Image: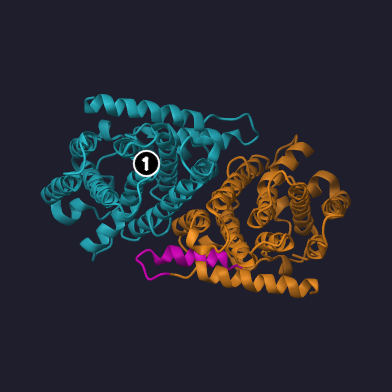
Chain colours: A cyan, B orange
C-alpha cells in the first residue's frame, strides 16, 4: 500500500480508538472528561501512535492490541501539551490553530484534565480485558517502558531542562541534546519500543536495538524540524504564532547552529534513522515516515 | 505489640523507603527531583501506606513488598496535594505547617513535580526488580486498581466535584458523599485493596469484600473528621488556617449536617468500619487505627 494511504488507515484505527476511550460519561465530574476529550481531539499527526502500530505491524504482532497501546501513549502526549500550555508554563493561547484547553475550560479543570490523561494511560495499559494477545508480563513491560520515558528521567525531565534553559547565556549542544532527548525524544522512542513489546520482541534482540536507534534519531530529527518550522513555517499551517521560541528566549537548534546548520542536522539525523533499519526488513513505511517528517510543513 | 509502637515501626519502614525513592540524582533536571522530594517529605500521618502494609501483614503477605507498593500510593497522594495547593486550585500557602511546594519552588517546577510523582508511582509499581514475591499478574492488578482509584472516575473526579461545588446553593448529601468517595475515599480504599493484592487475596474472597467495606467507611470517616477539624481544630496542630473551608465557601459535612451531626456521622462510620472486620481476624491494629483516626487532633 502506498505511504499516504497506509498512514490514513493507521489514523482511522487510532482515531476510532481515541473516540472510544474519550467518550464522556454522565457523571458529576463530566467537565473533566470533556476537557480530556478536547485535549485528545486537537488533531495533530499522531506520529507516536502511528509509530507504535507501524513497528508492531512490521514485526508481525497483533494490530488491534498495538492500536490500543498506542492510544495510551497518545494520552500521555496530550496531557503534556495541556500542562505545557498552562499559564505557569508556556502560557499559550493557541495549539494547532485551536484555543488551548485552559482557554476553553477553567484553568483548574484543564490542570486536572492533564492529570486525568496521564492517569488514563496507565488505566488503559493495565486493563487486561482490552487486549487479545498481550500477557501480564508484556503489560508490565509496557507500563515500565512508558512510565520511565514519560517521567522525571524522561519527558518531564526534558520539560524542566527546557524551562530552565530559557534565556540561558551559556547553552551547550550537550544540554540542548539532553533537553530534547527528554522533552520530545523519549516518548517517540518509547512509542516504537511499545511496538516491539506488543510484537513480543525481546530486549536483547538485535532488531530491538535497531528500532530503538531508528526511533531515537527520528525523535531528535522531529524536534530539529519543529525548531526550523518555528522560524520559517507558515503560521496557518503550523497553527500557532511563528517566532514564539525566539520571543520566549528559547534555545533551539536554530539559535544554536543557525538555520542552515539545523537543516543539515535534520538531513543527517533522518539519514541515520533510515540507515538503522537497512538490511533488516522491508520497512518501507517507516523509511517513508522518516522522509515525511523531514519534509512536513507543520 | 501495642498500637503506637506498631504504627511507629510501620512509619519507619515507610519513611526509609520514601527516602530511597526520592533521592535526588545529579542531573540537569535535579530541581524537579528536589521538588518531588520536598512534596513527599511533608510529614503527615502516612495513613494510606500504613493501611497497605497493615492489611498485607494481617493477611500474611510479604511485608517488604507491601512497603514498596505502599510508597507508590503515597507518591500519588502527595502529587494530589501539590496540585491541589496550586494557585489555580486552592491557592494554599501552607500545608502541614510548611510552605507549599509552589512557594518553595517556581510554580512550573511544582506543577511538574506533581506530574513526576504521579508518574513515579507507576514507574515503581511496574519495576519488577523491586519485588520479591509479586508476580507480573499481581503487579498488573495493583496498577489497575491504583490507576482507576486515582483517575477521573476516582480521586480526580472527586477533586472536580469539589471545585464545582464551591458556593453551590443546592448541595445534596448524595453529591457530598460522591465528592468525598472520590476525593479522599478512593485512595484510602485502594490502599487497603493493595494490601489484599500483595497478600494474594482474590477479589471474590469474602475477606476481600470485608476489607473493602472497612476501608471505604474509614475513608469517609477520615474526611468527616477533616471537615470537623477545619472548624474546631487547633491551628498549630492542623498546620493550616482554621476555617479555610468556610472562607472558600466549601460545602462540608459540617456545613451540611452541623457540627453535632458530623460528629455523630463520624462515630457511626467508625463503628461500621470496625464491624466490617468483626469475626474474621484478630485485626487489633486496624480496629485501633479506626479509633485513632476518630480521635486525632490533626
Q: Main secondary structure of the magenta part?
A: helix
For the N terminus of chain A, the image quarter is top left
Split into 4 quadrants, where in the image is the C terminus of chain A? top left
The residue depicted at 47 percent of the width and 40 percent of the height is A102
The image quarter containing residue A177 is bottom left
Question: Magenta stretch containing residue B35, yes or no?
Answer: yes
Count numbered badges in the picture: 1
x%, y% of residue A162? 33, 56
- In magenta, the rendered stretch is B25-42
Query: Residue A255 location, x and y as percent?
Result: 19, 54
Up-down relation of residue A200 to residue A54 (above or below): below
Label 1: few (<14), some or many (≥20) within 10 Å?
A: many
Was residue B92 drawn as part of the magenta stretch in this picture?
Answer: no
Residue B32 percent across, percent down from the top left: 44, 62
- Front residue (pair A134, A18): A134
What is the x, y in percent for residue B273? 82, 52
| Of B162 and B190, the residue lying toward us | B190
Is residue B248 visible to the viewer in this orientation of the structure?
no
Residue at the disc numbered 1 = A199
Tell me what residue is drawn at x 24 percent, y 26 percent. A4
In-image side of B158 versus A183 (left or right): right
Amino acid at each position: 500500500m502506498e505511504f499516504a494511504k497506509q498512514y490514513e488507515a493507521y489514523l482511522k484505527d487510532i482515531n476510532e480508538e481515541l473516540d472510544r476511550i474519550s467518550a464522556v460519561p454522565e457523571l458529576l465530574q463530566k467537565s473533566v472528561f470533556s476537557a480530556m476529550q478536547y485535549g485528545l481531539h486537537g488533531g495533530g499527526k499522531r506520529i507516536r501512535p502511528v509509530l507504535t502500530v507501524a513497528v508492531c505491524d512490521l514485526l508481525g504482532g497483533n494490530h488491534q492490541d498495538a492500536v490500543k497501546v498506542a492510544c495510551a501513549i497518545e494520552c500521555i502526549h496530550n496531557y503534556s501539551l495541556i500542562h505545557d500550555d498552562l499559564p505557569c508554563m508556556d502560557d499559550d493561547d493557541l495549539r494547532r490553530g485551536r484555543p488551548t484547553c485552559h482557554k476553553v475550560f477553567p484553568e483548574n479543570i484543564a490542570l486536572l484534565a492533564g492529570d486525568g490523561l496521564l492517569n488514563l494511560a496507565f488505566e488503559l495499559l493495565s486493563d487486561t480485558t482490552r487486549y487479545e494477545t498481550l500477557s501480564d508480563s508484556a503489560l508490565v513491560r509496557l507500563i515500565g517502558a512508558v512510565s520511565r520515558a514519560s517521567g522525571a528521567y524522561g519527558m518531564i525531565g526534558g520539560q524542566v531542562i527546557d524551562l530552565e534553559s530559557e534565556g540561558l547565556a551559556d547553552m551547550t549542544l550537550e544540554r540542548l541534546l539532553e533537553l530534547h532527548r527528554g522533552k520530545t525524544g523519549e516518548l517517540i522512542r518509547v512509542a516504537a519500543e511499545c511496538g516491539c513489546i506488543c510484537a513480543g520482541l525481546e530486549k536483547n534482540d538485535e532488531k530491538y536495538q535497531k528500532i530503538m536507534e531508528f526511533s531515537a534519531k527520528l525523535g531528535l530529527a522531529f524536534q530539529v524540524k519543529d525548531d526550523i518550522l518555528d522560524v520559517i513555517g507558515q503560521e496557518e499551517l503550523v497553527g500557532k504564532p511563528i517566532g514564539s521560541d525566539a520571543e520566549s528566549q528559547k534555545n533551539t537548534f536554530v539559535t544554536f547552529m543557525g538555520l542552515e546548520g539545523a537543516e543539515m542536522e535534520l538531513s543527517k539525523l533522518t539519514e541515520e534513522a533510515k540507515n538503522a533499519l537497512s538490511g533488516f526488513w522491508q520497512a518501507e513505511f517507516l523509511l517513508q515516515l522518516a522522509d515525511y517528517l523531514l519534509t512536513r510543513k507543520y
